[in-house]
Image (spheres, coloured by chain):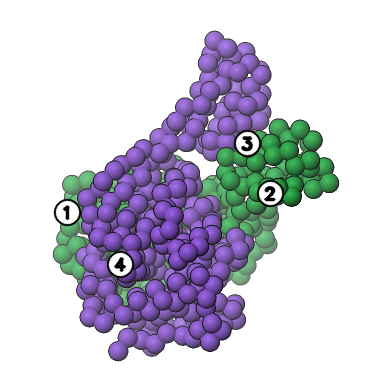
Amino acid sequence: MREIVVVSGKGGTGKTSVSASLAVLAAPVVVVDCDVDAADTHMLLTPSPGRENAFLSGHMAVIDPGACTACGKCLELCRFDAVSGDTSGIYQIDPVGCEGCGVCARFCPSGAILMEERNCGVWMVSSARTGPLVHARLAPAAENSGRLVSLVRTEARRIASEKGLETVICDGPPGIGCPVIASVTGASMILAVTEPSLSALHDLERVLSLAAHFSVPSAVCINKHDINPDITERIESAMKERGVPVAGRIGYDPGFTRSLLTGMTVVETDSPTAAEIVRLWEELLSIGDSGDG
Amino acid sequence: MNGGGSFTVAVASGKGGTGKTTVAVNLARSMGTRVTLLDCDVEEPNCTLFLYGGIITTREVGIPVPEVDESLCDACGECSRFCAYKAIVSVGSAPLVFPGMCHGCGGCALVCPRGAISEKESRIGTVERSECGSVTLVTGRLDVGMAMAPPLVRAVKECSRAGEPCIIDCPPGTSCPMIAAIRGADMVLLVTEPTPFGLHDLGLAVNAVAEVGIPAGIVVNRTGPEGLDVGAFAKERGIPVLLEIPDDRRAAEAYSRGELLVDAIPGWKSLFELLRERTVAMAGGRMTREFRQGRDRRPE
């Protein structure tokens, strides 16, 4: 099974548009939306929605006001600034700050703090024109996005092997932290989508270092390459130095947004960039076939 | 909450790449007073690419992770049973510590009946400070391979200065790093673009900000004739649109080279000065009803 994870470092470079387009070209595939904070793949693949499964993960402290003696122990021990207390003796936990460690509950002398299971969102297996789409919706301001990413990825791999599908395409989150690490560890290949700006190049370097750190082979696609040819050239030479192949270049194309309005990917339209994405997919396949990328 | 003319505004968005950093750096440059800009997008900090000033200080930031004194440990396993993050695991004679999973709550040291656990700092990144004219820029930079952004975000936020306005460039998304960045701010500027993705993720961000209970204003970036109507959404949710930034190739080009829009494009200085006025008014709770419903025009 081949698992290609689309990342970028910087947000807004075109991860979702590119990964949904690749899914159309590779279909039937399993697609998994690992950007659980701001999941958008369903807007391009327009699946018939699957049943929602609750994502219960971690715990949250809750103070029983009847049992609380306002001793202030919880306030003293909490390292996440999640306890507020005042002289009137009303102590409260801010659910947004609580990281569920359980220290306050364990050391409350009156046993007034309970650790409640936390509902952090939902995940679904929906049915798209490209095949199964595994996606999720993190609850607003919720914790544990990394665990939710691991869950949807595991589910996607299980479905792929059950249905005999050889490719899983993951639409990854921006950044290099917890949910990105959960998205890339153990993947067959990372496709980093970048654009010719100093910010995007800076962020690309960091996400490629992350991929190298976890020994996952990478390839790069330069989106909107014609916006600033000088920086495109800089990206290409930086990639040569790193030994990371540039598998594709996509021109600036308002068709990306226009196709989105109709719930289609750009490769399903007569947009001039469709052919460039087809070449990107062919290149990725040949990189994958040539061994370790 | 700050008083006396100082306030904290967090610049956030659900979707990445909508222009948070653009708004944060250009607003900082347009403040007209001394201001602290905190780059809390510690996974991918970019403000330094737009505001140049030598780094004055770099400080390492760590989180406290457990260190087990094996001569005292009797392998009772209490630490491992207590840890909510599976960061300390009992195997054989002494527990194994996984610093990458540790949130630094200190619970294991507290529950150890033999006092065998102490804490040591484990580096997760750095905080850099630089002076760029009237802007003091504080940048958090997460080490590559580290998962835990929120403690570093909190370390950056400790660098805000009393009596001076503070602008926070937040990480994208709606989960812990973004929440850690906006907590305690007087208001949040949500930057979006008038596309289906932009509007969808703006909805998610509005919900997350509401959960934290901070007033929000919207900045629509790259508006144009083909754009969706963000104003209708804003009205429905009762959130003012404080600024519309027109779609302009010159802006994309200046951004790509790491230039400030207020310097690169004639007339755009007044655009960000307008945002400053509205932000200051809203953060100070001085916004009139008329103002709250007002919408910005394009620059002349």
Q: Nearer the viewer, residue B10 or A273?
A: B10
C-alpha separation, residue under disc 4 versus residue under disc 1? 33 Å
Judging from the image, mark 1 belongs to the subunit labelled: A
C-alpha separation, residue under disc 2 versus residue under disc 4? 39 Å
| Residue at horizontal 63 percent and vertical 27 percent from the top | B110
Residues behind callouts 2 and 4 on a single chain = no
4 or 1: mark nearer the eye: 4
Residues behind callouts 1 and 2 on a single chain = yes
| Residue at horizontal 65 percent and vertical 25 percent from the top | B111
Amino acid type assigned to the residue bearing label 1 in the image: Ser
Q: Is residue A201 above or below residue A228?
A: above
Residue B50 at least partly seen: yes
Q: Which residue is mark 2?
A: A86
Q: Which residue is mark 1?
A: A237
C-alpha separation, residue under disc 1 versus residue under disc 2? 59 Å
Q: Which residue is mark 3?
A: A77
Q: Nearer the viewer, residue B77 or A28?
A: B77
Q: Assess disc 2: are there few (<14), some (14-19) or many (≥20) residues with their C-alpha within 10 Å of its C-alpha.
A: few
Q: Position of residue A24 (x, y in %)?
A: 44, 67
Q: Position of residue A286 (x, y in %)?
A: 30, 53
Q: Position of residue A271 (x, y in %)?
A: 33, 78
Amino acid type assigned to the residue bearing label 4 in the image: Arg
Amino acid type assigned to the residue bearing label 2 in the image: Asp
Q: Assess disc 1: are there few (<14), some (14-19) or many (≥20) residues with their C-alpha within 10 Å of its C-alpha.
A: few
Query: Left or right: A251 with respect to B189?
Result: left
Judging from the image, mark 3 belongs to the subunit labelled: A
- Chain drawn purple in the picture: B
Local SS, label 1:
helix
**Total label count?**
4
